[in-house]
């Protein structure tokens, strides 16, 4: 069964958040950075398990366009040129429902890789 579309979609440019509001009363505000690093595109997810590509330096990314894709999804266009992810209604709902866990997991992956959310920052780790 196809997931219901949000009844409203708002792009808050100042806070760089996409707000999804559902007729059930549920609402999620997802940052542009969060959506960019969790893009369902092959560029981010790879073509199979273990081929994911950690996205770094996306703290300042913005959504520059939202393109409806049929009755089932949105294509988000980002300021860094990324535009190949098709965000289905069910995937957007999953991101909203699991935002905190997914974000913490992403931050842990960045830390483990010695990478940063900031494109102008290099991370150097010293081991004892």
Image (cartoon, rainbow, N blue to C red):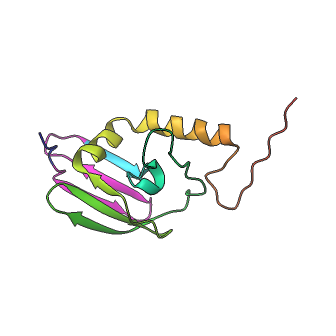
Q: Is residue 11 magenta?
A: yes
Q: Along the horizontal axis of the image, is 4 left or right of 58? A: left
Q: Residue at x 66, y 39 (%)?
A: 111
**Residue 25, quarter of the rendered image:** top left
Single out the residue that lies furthest toward the front: 47
Q: Residue at x 51, y 39 (%)?
A: 50
Whole-percent x and y of residue 15? Answer: 44, 59
Q: Of 119 and 30, which appears nearest the observer?
A: 119
Q: Along the horizontal axis of the image, is 20 left or right of 25? A: right
Whole-percent x and y of residue 97? Answer: 32, 36
The answer to whether residue 62 is visible is: yes
Where is the C terminus found, in terms of image quarters? top right
Does 43 appear above or below 123?
below
Whole-percent x and y of residue 94? Answer: 31, 39
Does 11 appear above or below 20?
below
Whole-percent x and y of residue 57? Answer: 60, 57
Q: Which residues are magenta?
A: 5-26
Q: Of 69 and 45, which appears nearest the observer?
A: 45
**Residue 2, quarter of the rendered image:** top left
Q: Is residue 85 magenta?
A: no
Q: Residue at x 54, y 49 (%)?
A: 53
Does 101 appear above or below 20?
above
Single out the residue that lies furthest toward the right: 128
Q: Along the horizontal axis of the image, is 3 left or right of 50? A: left
Q: Residue at x 46, y 57 (%)?
A: 43
Numbered marks: total: 0
């Amino acid at each position: 069964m196809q997931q219901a579309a949000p009844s409203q979609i708002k792009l808050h440019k100042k806070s760089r958040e996409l707000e999804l509001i559902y007729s059930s009363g549920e609402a999620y505000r997802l940052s542009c950075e969060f959506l960019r690093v969790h893009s369902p595109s092959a560029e981010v997810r790879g073509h199979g398990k273990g081929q994911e590509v950690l996205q770094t330096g996306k703290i300042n990314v913005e959504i520059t366009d939202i393109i409806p894709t049929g009755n089932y999804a949105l294509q988000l266009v980002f300021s860094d040129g990324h535009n190949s992810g098709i965000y289905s209604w069910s995937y957007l709902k999953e991101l909203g429902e699991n935002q905190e866990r997914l974000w913490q997991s992403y931050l842990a992956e960045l830390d483990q890789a010695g990478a940063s959310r900031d494109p102008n920052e290099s991370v150097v780790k010293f081991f004892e």
